[in-house]
Image (cartoon, coloured by chain):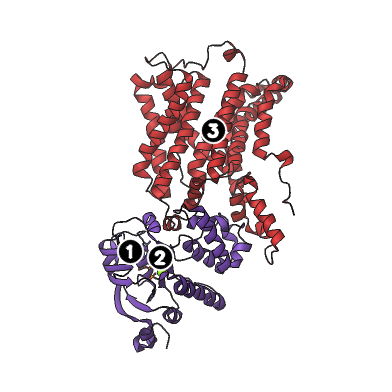
Amino acid sequence: MPPPARKPFGLSWEGGIFLALLLYPLFPMFERGLFAATGRSLGEQLPLVFIFALLAYGLNVVVGYTGLLHLGIAAFFAVGAYTAGIFSTAAYAFQWPFWVVLPLGALAAAGVGLLLGAPTLRLRGDYLALVTLGFGEVTKFTLKNVVGITAGSQGLSPINPPTDHPAWSDDFRPFYYLTLGVLILAALLLRNLERSRLGRAWIALREDELAANCMGLNPAKLKLAAFALGSGLAGLAGVLYATRLTSTADPNAYDFNRSIFLVCCLIVGGLGSRLGALLGVMLLVGFDNILTPIIDGAIQQQFPDAGGKIFLTFTGWRLAVFGLALILMMRFRPEGLFPSSRVKHELHPDEAVSEPVEPITMGKTTGEVAAIDGGKA
Amino acid sequence: MPPLLEVTALRSGYGPIDVLHDIGLSVDAGEIVTMIGANGAGKTTTLLTVSGAVRVRGGRVAFDGHDLTRTPAHKVVSLGMAQSPEGRKIFPRLTVLENLQMGAFTRTDKPAIADDLEKMFGLFPILKERKGQAGGLLSGGQQQMLAIARALMSRPKLLLLDEPSLGLAPQIVTQIFDIIRDLNAKQGMSVLLVEQNARLALKVAHRGYVLETGRVTLADKASVLLNDPRIRAAYLGE
Ligand SMILES: Nc1ncnc2c1ncn2[C@@H]1O[C@H](COP(=O)(O)OP(=O)(O)OP(=O)(O)O)[C@@H](O)[C@H]1O
Ligand SMILES: [Mg+2]
């Protein structure tokens, strides 16, 4: 009996979303229509979503795969951005090209990750959370204070674009495809990693460190590897972010709020799930950057004299809405909106057990294996 | 020939407290040895210290020609020591098959691993039926079988078993002990067994040690211990 077809047109949800995103710029009527309706260019907004999704992928390696609570991912995002700032602006003599700075930012962030991780990863979960949180804040204040190196709250600018071609600044598409391309490459890398020996080892470690240790896994080394990879992806995102802003921006762009926002994206999307990280970011960034202004605009049309009455703007309420959504999520769908199949099984065993469990015939067994291994086919 | 495992004057513990004060024991190649003792006597701690998961504070652990006193847990597996820890610590979100593969994590001989997988499925047919299911969805007894099979996947010379009968139905306990005895008799695998069910443990084992508050207080042939009036009173409920 062939396993049931779960993927329309042989594409996973993730593949389908990436395909749609790849096709979007080819149909300018969408872009024009959305612009006419909302006054915003989706083509300009989406690269920011891609960058944060990349950052979320990095965080997901640490928090989702390996189960280490990391509350300072923004610091590694900053390392990437400031690598771009230092090696590509005219403030320094380097002025290296984008294609050198991009991997350099990732390496620098991974290096900082190793330096922070080596002495601290032996700490138990809650202590590690505090250390990463503290590191994030220290990084932000350092960036603010060593004005001679970082230009303080002015930020380093202008960061060189990847090319001098005029299309770079006139058209949203080059940067759109650059960021989407990096994101898709990262997704492919992570997909392979999840199925590899290393990926399984991370999950085993998250599930039961003692048992994993007894199987011959080296927890310290595995955690350090996760930390380095997660930080590296965050650094990559940081370079792209600074390139998009053409500046490292104010150090406040790399504060605790950003770190927590990304943790929220993962929780909403589903910890440990690539699709969850992507859609969690889309949902929350979309809420923040697209839906909030639209609602605000509508309210203003309704109540033209509302100016200054903060309770009449949605922006004033958006964090409360955010918090409420998170609480409801934890209560009714703790595995996130788009969980990995592994997590679904554990948190809703009653649903999972409704699959045939008692006498299993060989045919059904194969079907089940195929369903769970589905992503690997 | 020196014993396969030799533990001398072992001392270890957690935080400021020493739990093991003076443990001496040995396991010969091809032997099943059991440790019995009251709750909190230090049986689990002894196994964890021997395998390196808890640090040695004094004394010595020697295994198969290696000094393991300072060897971390992740390195002892490839030397031939496997452990099925207390409380069947399987990986609930990995499938049964992936759990078994984790047991062979340190091995690189793929065809032989595939071979051993089939052997485990032969020993525990239920694991074959459930191989695509998440480990956490197995029943308690099935999880215990998985934990033991996972430990066997490293092809150990010495298997450390911590309370394999915990919470299992009697016929499953019998089945598991039959398998252990069989692996010992046919493949010469040595076993260091910790078990609450002292009677059963002493029937399966060749020799036994009695632990009391971190010290070995009695050591003898299992058949002798089984008839010792002190043991009968304290551990066999007579
Ligand atoms: N992780 C730990 N941290 C601190 N103390 C511990 C820890 N694990 C065990 N202990 C203490 O060490 C002592 C011995 O515990 P151990 O688990 O080795 O006993 P045991 O003989 O295996 O008991 P049981 O038959 O109940 O499994 C106990 O007093 C216990 O409180
Ligand atoms: Mg115990």
**Contact check, label 2 and label 1, Cβ < 8 Å:** yes
Q: Which mark is residue B64?
A: 1
* Kind of residue indicated by mark 2: Lys
Q: Which residue is mark 3?
A: A54
Q: Chain of mark 3?
A: A
Q: Which mark is residue B130?
A: none
Q: Is residue B184 visible?
A: yes
Q: Nearer the viewer, residue B179 or A342?
A: B179
Q: Is residue A308 visible?
A: no
Q: Nearer the viewer, residue A158 or B181?
A: B181
Note the chain letter of the purple one: B
Q: In the image, residue A375 lies at what x, y percent?
A: 63, 45
**Contact check, label 2 and label 3, Cβ < 8 Å:** no
**Is residue A31 shown above or below B83?**
above
Q: CA distance from mark 1 to mark 3?
A: 49 Å
Q: Secondary structure at mark 3?
A: helix
Dot 2, crowdedness within 10 Å: few (<14), some or many (≥20)? many
